[in-house]
Amino acid sequence: MRKFKCGFVSIVGRPNVGKSTLLNSLLKEKVSIISKVPQTTRYIIRGILNLKSTQIVFVDTPGIHLFKDRLTSSLNILALNALKDVEVILYVTDSTRPPHKEEEKIMNSLALRKTPLIMALNKIDKSEKYIPDYIEMWQRKTGGKKGSLKYFIPISALKGTGLDKIQEVIVESLPQSPPFYEKDTITDFPIFYRVSDVIREKICSLLKEELPHNIAVEVESIDNQGSLVKVQARILIAKKSHKLIVIGRRGSMIKEIGTLARKDLEDMFGKKVFLDLWVKLEKDWYNKPRVLKELGYTGI
Ligand SMILES: Nc1nc2c(ncn2[C@@H]2O[C@H](COP(=O)(O)OP(=O)(O)OP(=O)(O)O)[C@@H](O)[C@H]2O)c(=O)[nH]1
Ligand SMILES: [Mg+2]
């Protein structure tokens, strides 16, 4: 009989390259939230793919960013720590955009490691234009050697292109080991944080510019009894002037956030959800260690 394989695979890269989209596509299940704004992912989120004789534990991470606030440095630490003690690193880049300064930071860190590395050049459904730039940059960093890099794989996380290849090379690299999780586990992401992320995803999709960066969601209670789940959550804003935008004219924006989030939460819980949302001003929360800790943005 073939021996069972199991291991951890961290997904890293700069914000917005499609790490969470890739995780969800690999799992064929929505575990991690997705949006057009940077810093959508603020937690370490494990998603488990159960194959016939292999269990792959994917670890989605916040995008590594060069902002100078405490939130960003916390998220960068989370992401870099998630590279330790894993069997494979999946480094995601965006082929539609040239390498950015953030790429230097990431590649410098990756080039020092011995962990087998796969570079997934994403968004090829849109363009493959900058693929050579990423390859060249890596080769420059490693003095022309491949280093720990095993493969460059062009992919589209959105369309599913190249994902079979990714899965195949990951399985190849994993050690023999019994599974870490029960076979029907998809994620161990705690429900309070999952719910808060669903709400934040809707905020990211409805609000513009830098506003989502200034917003956090804290779930206060989940009462799951009988045929109804009651959720109470507060939306933290960093500036007084944001209150009106989040609430909208006669409450239209917060209502829309609530309606969209409730739909997803009802799918998640498989029952009716009553969602009670309110807005709280917590000035400059993204620079307050206490609040970051409470929100789980320093690790959960
Ligand atoms: N065209 C195209 N768009 C993609 C692809 N993968 C992701 N996107 C889009 O890129 C944006 C960012 O996707 P996310 O998955 O949230 O990116 P992320 O790397 O997890 O971002 P952070 O969590 O902020 O670090 C979204 O608008 C996605 O729909 C792809 O393969 N092709
Ligand atoms: Mg993400």
Image (spheres, rainbow, N blue to C red):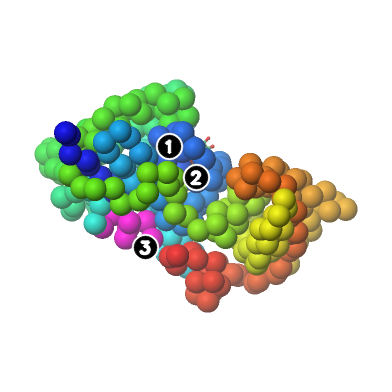
Query: Residue 228 bears which disc, if any?
Result: none
Badge 1 or badge 3: first in the primary sequence: 1
Q: Residue at x 37, y 40 (%)?
A: 49
Residue 281, visible in the rendered structure: yes
Question: Which one is nearer the viewer's eye here, 33 or 284?
Answer: 33
Q: Dot 2 lies on which element?
A: loop
Image quadrant containing the N terminus: top left
Left or right, 29 with respect to 139, comes to right
| Label pair 2/1, CB-CB below 8 angstroms | yes
> Few, some or many C-alpha atoms within 10 Å of disc 1 (few <14, some 14-19, many ≥20)?
some
Residue 223, image quadrant: bottom right
The total of numbered circles placed on residues is 3
Q: In the image as oriented, which residue stretches furthest toward the right?
A: 250
Badge 3 or badge 2: first in the primary sequence: 2
Residue 206, visible in the rendered structure: no
The residue where tag 1 is placed is 27
What are the residue bounds of the magenta stretch? 77-84
Residue flagged by tag 3: what amino acid is it?
Ile
Q: Comparing marks 3 and 2, which lies closer to the viewer?
A: 2
| Label pair 3/2, CB-CB below 8 angstroms | no
Rounded to the nearest angstrom, the CA distance separating label 3 from label 2 is: 22 Å
Residue 232: x and y in percent read 70, 62
> Few, some or many C-alpha atoms within 10 Å of disc 3 (few <14, some 14-19, many ≥20)?
some
The residue where tag 3 is placed is 77
Residue flagged by tag 1: what amino acid is it?
Leu
Prevailing secondary structure class for the magenta stretch in the rendered image: helix
The residue where tag 2 is placed is 31
Residue 175: x and y in percent read 18, 44
Left or right, 140 with respect to 153, comes to left
Q: Residue at x 75, y 62 (%)?
A: 278
Task: From this view, report whether residue 118 is shown above or below residue 7.
Answer: above
